[in-house]
Image (cartoon, rainbow, N blue to C red):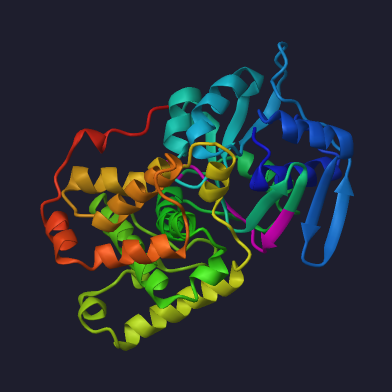
Amino acid sequence: MGCGGIGGIVACNLIERGVETMIVTHNPAIADAINRTGFTLREPQSVRFVPGRAVAALPDAPGEFDFVFLATQPPQVVAAARSALPFLRPDGAMVCFQNGLCESYVEDVAGAQRVLGAIVVWGGSMPEPGVYDRTSAGGFVVGRLDGGDDARFAALRTLLDPIGPVEVTHNLRGARWSKLAINCAISSLGTIGGERLGDLLRQRFVRRLGLEVMTEAVAVARGAGVQLEKVSGTLDLNWIALTPADVSGPGSPSLLAKHAVLLAVGAKYRRLRSSMLVAIERGREPAVDFLNGEVVRGGRQLGIAVPVNQRVQDYIGAIWRRERQPGLALLRAFYAESRSEAYAATAARYRPSAGDQPPAT
């Protein structure tokens, strides 16, 4: 379900290996392109052309599938899960590939025993319908929200291992929150800045904003009792969070090391464009309420100030409404605002509001 950057690359690999797969995209242009010319998968060392078929709507007669792979953007995940539920075998599972904390929303649709999570630790994009770029290497981290074992992990590994190595976690919630913190910085600042990640993270002020966004996310996760863990060897969020010494001493060795790590992240994912920015460009609602919005809601519930994430959410909302234009100038304006005394006073007065509710699903 969903055939954008991640979904398209996963689908292409499954079809190429002869896995019986139904590809569903509600974008007719993508379905038409795949049906006419198949998938074009561009990787650093190769270009592959894979014949395929896609449908723009589910057929009337349900089938029985072992897995439903949910690869839509988060705002569409619940609707996708509901429409696909009749096609899932009683012992099958829905697998969430989204960033954010989507498993809990899908569990409300399908039941906790029929939902697995798959954290994607690589990058992909769709520059045009039916054409897919693998922008970085990596694999998947799979698990259940309750931390339990699952016999279906073996079948899932068989399907996904050829795309990237699969790691099983018994702390999916902790891994999800770590990835959420990273995406709150990388995807969201990439949306405001309007450029590829490598270009943005060469700017010191962007790295500083990224560190502040992740620090707030870590504070909320800790407040909620979440045990953060590394995601497939990526950033250690417990370490990356700013300490009082980092905040008060701009030249502290710890802070310099954290900037260096973000520079390395920018180099690895230099070709990555924010999926939220791409969604806005295509007229689709951005997923900010499922990223920074999760931090904002958690902060309000726990009484933890998260002003940077709040303003990120506000800025991206303004971009979505065409009230602001993404670009480095806008990101500089955001940074300048976040240094002001008025902004600090606003953070100190941070209070719960009607926006505390989860996004409508």
Q: Is residue 360 left or right of residue 84?
A: left
Frontmost residue, 284 versus 248: 284
Quadrant location, the N terminus: top right
Q: Quadrant of the C terminus?
A: top left
Residue 165 relative to residue 235: left or right:
right
Please identify the quarter of the rendering in which residue 19 is found: top right
Q: Residue furthest top?
A: 60
Residue 354 in sight from this viewpoint: yes
Position of 153 with respect to 261 (left or right) is right
Q: x%, y% of residue 132? A: 74, 50
Q: Give, as a single range, the part of the protein colored magenta.
A: 133-147
As drawn, 231 above or below 85 = below
Residue 124 percent across, percent down from the top left: 66, 54
When the figure is inspected, residue 222 is found, relative to residue 91, above or below; the finding is below
Is 71 within the magenta? no
Q: Position of residue 280 (x, y in %)?
A: 53, 43
Q: At which x and y percent is residue 79?
A: 53, 25
